Amino acid sequence: MKIRLLLSLMASLLILSAPVHAERIKDIANIEGVRNNQLIGYGLVVGLPGTGEKTRYTEQTFRTMLKNFGINLSDSVRPNSKNVAVVAVHANMPAFIKPGQNLDVTVSSLGEAKSLRGGTLIQTFLKGVDGNVYAIAQGSLVVSGFSAEGLDGSQVIQNTPTVGRIPSGAIVERSVA
């Protein structure tokens, strides 16, 4: 009788001491109306080592940026923009993120830039589909791709040198209601 009681007591203790694995509700359930929000922006990457683009489109964007800083170039001045590229900037803003938190950002060339390696994204507003600014992105790009050309016309391209990331490169300015 005592042995049975002792065995049942030991079994109860083993059951009670087993690790408990709990799941968070947000990991196993979907809440209606709660989702990530895609953000997009348009900006300039500067500081490229001659791998940028020299198009009218880039020149116009570059002039607009300078004008926003209070610098006016005459129409006769043609800025050398081979170290500049026009880019699309995008990020996913998770639900429940708060102002001041950071987002990872992806930057993609829109023009004929050969590479974004070594470039820095100038302050870019990231907007939602409603047109409101939700985050501001800026920073140095991490580009995993590269390209190389030989004098004989041979070319090697690994990954995509015209796409880069900026880890924690955007600061959330407002949350989604």
Image (cartoon, rainbow, N blue to C red):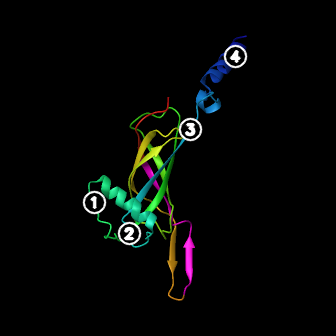
- Amino acid on which the number 4 mark rests in the picture: Ser
Q: Are marks 1 and 4 in contact (CB under 8 Å)?
A: no
Mark 2 against mark 4, which lies toward the viewer? Answer: 2
Instruction: Give the distance between the C-alpha atoms of the residues marked 3 and 1, in whole angstroms.
Output: 40 Å
Of mark 3 and mark 1, the one earlier in the sequence is 3
Q: Are marks 3 and 1 in contact (CB under 8 Å)?
A: no
- Amino acid on which the number 1 mark rests in the picture: Asn
Q: Which residue is mark 3?
A: 36
Q: Residue at x 40, y 62 (%)?
A: 60
- The residue positioned farthest toward the front in the image shown: 75
Of mark 2 and mark 3, the one earlier in the sequence is 3
Q: Is residue 10 left or right of residue 130?
A: right
Mark 2 against mark 1, which lies toward the viewer? Answer: 1
In this picture, is 151 found above or below 140? below
Q: Which residue is mark 2?
A: 81
Instruction: Give the distance between the C-alpha atoms of the residues marked 2 and 3, in whole angstroms.
Output: 36 Å
Expressed as whole percent of the image width and height from the top left, the position of residue 3 reads: 70, 15
Q: Residue at x 48, y 43 (%)?
A: 127
Q: Which residues are magenta?
A: 153-169
